[in-house]
Image (cartoon, rainbow, N blue to C red):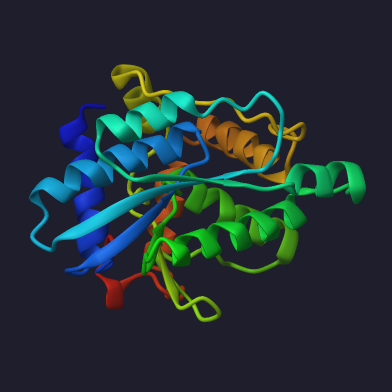
Amino acid sequence: MKIQRLYSFVRKAVDDYHMIEDGDKIAVGISGGKDSLTLLYALHGLMRFYPQKFQIHAVTVDLGFQNLDLSRIGSLCEELSIPYTIVKTDIAQIVFKERKENSPCSLCTKMRKGALNQAIKDAGCNKVAYAHHKDDVVETMMMSLIYEGRFHTFSPVTHLDRTDLKVIRPLIYVNEADVICFVNKYELPVVKSPCPVDGYTKREYIKNLLKKINADAPGVKNRMFTAICNGNMKGWGDNFGGIK
């Protein structure tokens, strides 16, 4: 995927759901993975021509795993003149060694978001951009349907009452396959997750299930995404200018 096409998808999402306002200072959560680096690149480009002026600040929560090298990401941020904050934590030690969680993802996510939100507030940001793409939207809906018995997924824009931050998701119109192509084409410095349960989660199971369903019924993921946009789900659809 060429960078102009990425800008087009992100611009449409930002406009459809009113994600960015003049004067915003937006933190971009950087895990080191392909999605967050693509989002960083996209928002950096959007800054140059979007009519509402805004700033971005990259933030990584270092969970404390050994051999995590973020130097190339730091170099990328320096090259793009983006401020970059690394938050050092002992989350991995607490979750895997002290608590020895059998299902560590929930506690890890809660602690990571707490550390991220505090760093965002300390940096003076009023919004945070998450790198959820179209596949994430559909996978989250399927997880909710299968494991919770409800038709639900996250919204393009979410207000966090406790921290008074807004979460925006500018990649919601971008397919994961396009993210992979973009990262490879532009040689972004992806850092492999050192988490021992990476690739062995419920989300990974749902991802593989959807691949099989989509192979049997091509286009089903796009139809599911359209159903989400048109399904009167909170935060989606007519009130926010979603896809018809």
Query: Which residue is found at the position 30% from the left and 18% from the top?
Result: 185
Image quarter where the N terminus lies is top left
**Foreground residue among 242 and 196:** 196
Counting from the top left corner in percent of width and height, residue 204 is at 66, 37
Does residue 97 appear in this view?
yes
Counting from the top left corner in percent of width and height, residue 86 is at 51, 44
- Considering every residue shown, the one lying at the far bottom of the view is 161
**Foreground residue among 133 and 118:** 118
Q: Is residue 7 left or right of residue 110?
A: left
Counting from the top left corner in percent of width and height, residue 157 is at 39, 68
Q: Is residue 19 left or right of residue 233?
A: left
Q: Is residue 43 above or below residue 124?
A: above
- Residue 26 location, quadrant: bottom left
Does residue 20 appear in this view?
no
Image quarter where the C terminus lies is bottom left
**Foreground residue among 109 and 55:** 55
Query: Which residue is found at the position 50% from the left and 33% from the top?
Result: 33
Query: Which residue is found at the position 83% from the left and 49% from the top?
Result: 94
Counting from the top left corner in percent of width and height, residue 214 is at 51, 35
- Residue 240 location, quadrant: bottom left
How many marks the image carries: the answer is 0
Query: Which residue is found at the position 44% from the left and 53% from the top?
Result: 130
Q: Is residue 204 left or right of residue 211?
A: right
